[in-house]
């Protein structure tokens, strides 16, 4: 006989975990969490496994409705702000550090300086967990949940069962079926393709998000020190002069490391990312520069476009390319010897020296260089010829499901949260969106 649950959560990332924490306050709910990856201590995958992409992430908790997702489109500014506070307190309860960056008078000074050189600074309060603490915080949450809900790990949900416009359950890859009253889909970026296919099969309305394509920049720690000591992460935005594209900094990792990321399951694409440890410091700071492009029609496949660009770098290098800015500006590739001679040594040792102009479109490359030159006036040294550029960094946020303000899909009692549904782009809003769905389920199940 098929087992029936009150709630099934698909995906054990921050969104699924926070939904579970909220739901498990009700002692009488029978909850199942299905995660296709391994348990926190057993996993090696960067984005897959209990804890989600969050477990190995840099753990910067960005505490502003303006960054990390679109929750305010659903909840409004004030409710999103209140929810972010609520979620932040849970992170604190499970061991997040009290220190907060990005607040105070100095932030305003930097904002003014930035505005003089056509850069917009969005001040964001940030709590930095660091990769090690991020893992321990998520592990503490998992331990807390252990006795209160059922986990099925290394089990992949493959089919969503819907009957008459109402959710009935899921079927797993091995053909096992689980029934439920409520379903929360929180499959993250790793499961975004799957969710998008299921949405198509179920005839759900979806909207495309713009794709963000760019590079990861690596400079000596001293270059960014003044900014990061105040802000931890400088959220800067620039409109490219040549194309009027919006370009922004993203995921700044002071004294951090550049890393490779593989996404896409059986047909993986290798992209670049970054993180920093709380207690292990490198000599470099890295950050992403991303060009957000809302394409003209017809442009139906932002994920395919982003992957295609990343694949070009994969074809040329087998993975991630690295180039010195000076080499790019002089129109030649970087070589191992040129990199070796440079003042900045790559923290991602496996990156292959090459030429990013074979990979990125002229439009993107032009905007990225313009922004580096503008940033150089705020943080001298950013546009040094020794600055390292890694490619390609792509942020896939496709397939925004049509959702109600409580994140319910067009299928009754089926909710979609986190990065996979196009709701969030970071830990805090992913977590918060899990809480939104859980609260609605609690409200309905009490009636
Ligand atoms: C290297 C790196 C650094 C980052 N640094 C930061 C940072 O500093 N600050 C920040 O705010 N954000 C950061 N992020 C982003 C952050 O990790 C994500 O926004 C967040 O984890 C999204 O949470 P989620 O629960 O929506 O999805 P995820 O964390 O991706 O979790 C989804 C889970 O669902 C599972 N899954 C997928 N499909 C299925 C299926 N069909 N059946 C069962 N299970 C499934 C996956 O295996 C995965 O474990 C970083 C991400 C990476 C990769």
Image (cartoon, rainbow, N blue to C red):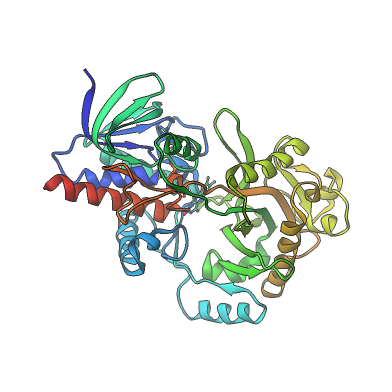
| In the depicted structure, whether residue 303 falls above or below residue 264 | below
* Frontmost residue, 160 versus 115: 160
Q: For the point 55% across and 52% down, which residue is it?
A: 276
Q: Nearer the viewer, residue 7 or 24?
A: 7
Q: Nearer the viewer, residue 344 or 7?
A: 7
> Where residue 179 appears, x then y in whole percent?
25, 28
Q: Which residue corresponds to the image point at 26% horizontal and 48% vertical from the top-left?
A: 438
* Residue depicted at x 30% and y 46%: 19
Q: Position of residue 65 (x, y in %)?
A: 41, 65
Q: Quadrant of residue 49?
A: top left
Q: Is residue 49 left or right of residue 308?
A: left
Q: How many circles with numbers are drawn on the protein?
A: 0
Q: Position of residue 383 (x, y in %)?
A: 75, 65
Question: Could you tell me which residue is drawn at 47 percent across and 46 percent down?
Answer: 132
Q: Quadrant of residue 220?
A: bottom right
Q: Is residue 436 visible?
A: yes
Q: Quadrant of residue 203?
A: top left
């Amino acid at each position: 006989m098929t087992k029936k649950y009150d709630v099934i959560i698909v995906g054990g990332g921050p969104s699924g975990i926070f939904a579970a924490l909220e739901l498990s306050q009700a002692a009488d709910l029978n909850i199942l969490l299905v995660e296709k990856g391994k348990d926190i201590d057993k996993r090696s995958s960067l984005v897959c496994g209990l804890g989600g992409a969050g477990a190995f992430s840099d753990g910067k908790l960005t505490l502003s409705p303006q960054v990390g997702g679109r929750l305010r489109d659903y909840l409004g500014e004030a409710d999103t702000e209140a929810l972010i506070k609520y979620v932040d307190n849970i992170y604190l309860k499970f061991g997040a550090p009290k220190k907060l960056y990005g607040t105070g008078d100095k932030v305003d000074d930097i904002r003014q300086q930035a505005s003089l050189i056509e850069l917009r600074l969005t001040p964001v309060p940030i709590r930095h967990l660091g990769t090690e603490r991020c893992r321990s915080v998520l592990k503490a949450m998992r331990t807390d949940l252990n006795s209160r809900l059922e986990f099925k790990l290394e089990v992949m949900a493959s089919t969503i069962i819907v009957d008459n416009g109402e959710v009935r359950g899921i079927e797993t890859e091995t053909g096992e079926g689980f029934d439920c009253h409520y379903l929360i889909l929180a499959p993250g970026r790793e499961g975004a393709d799957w969710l998008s296919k299921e949405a198509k099969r179920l005839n759900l309305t979806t909207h495309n998000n713009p794709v963000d394509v760019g590079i990861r920049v690596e400079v000596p720690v001293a270059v960014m020190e003044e900014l990061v000591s105040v802000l931890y992460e400088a959220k800067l935005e620039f409109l490219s002069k040549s194309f009027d594209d919006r370009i922004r900094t993203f995921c700044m990792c002071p004294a951090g490391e550049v890393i490779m990321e593989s996404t896409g399951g059986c047909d993986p694409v290798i992209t670049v990312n970054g993180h920093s440890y709380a207690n292990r410091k490198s000599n470099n700071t890295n950050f992403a520069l991303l060009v957000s492009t809302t394409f003209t029609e017809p442009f139906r496949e932002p994920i395919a476009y982003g992957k295609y660009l990343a694949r070009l770098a994969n074809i040329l290098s087998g993975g991630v390319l690295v180039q010195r800015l000076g080499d790019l500006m002089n129109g030649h590739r970087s070589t191992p010897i040129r990199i070796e001679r440079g003042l900045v040594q790559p923290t991602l040792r496996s990156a292959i020296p090459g030429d990013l102009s074979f990979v990125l479109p002229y439009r993107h490359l032009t905007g990225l260089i313009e922004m580096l030159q503008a940033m150089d006036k705020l943080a001298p040294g950013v546009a040094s010829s020794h600055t390292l550029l890694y490619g390609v960094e792509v942020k896939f946020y496709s397939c925004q499901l049509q959702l109600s303000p409580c994140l319910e899909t067009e299928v009754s009692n089926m909710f979609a949260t986190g990065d996979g549904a196009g709701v969030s782009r970071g830990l805090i809003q992913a977590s918060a969106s899990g809480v939104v769905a859980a609260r609605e389920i609690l409200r309905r199940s009490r009636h």
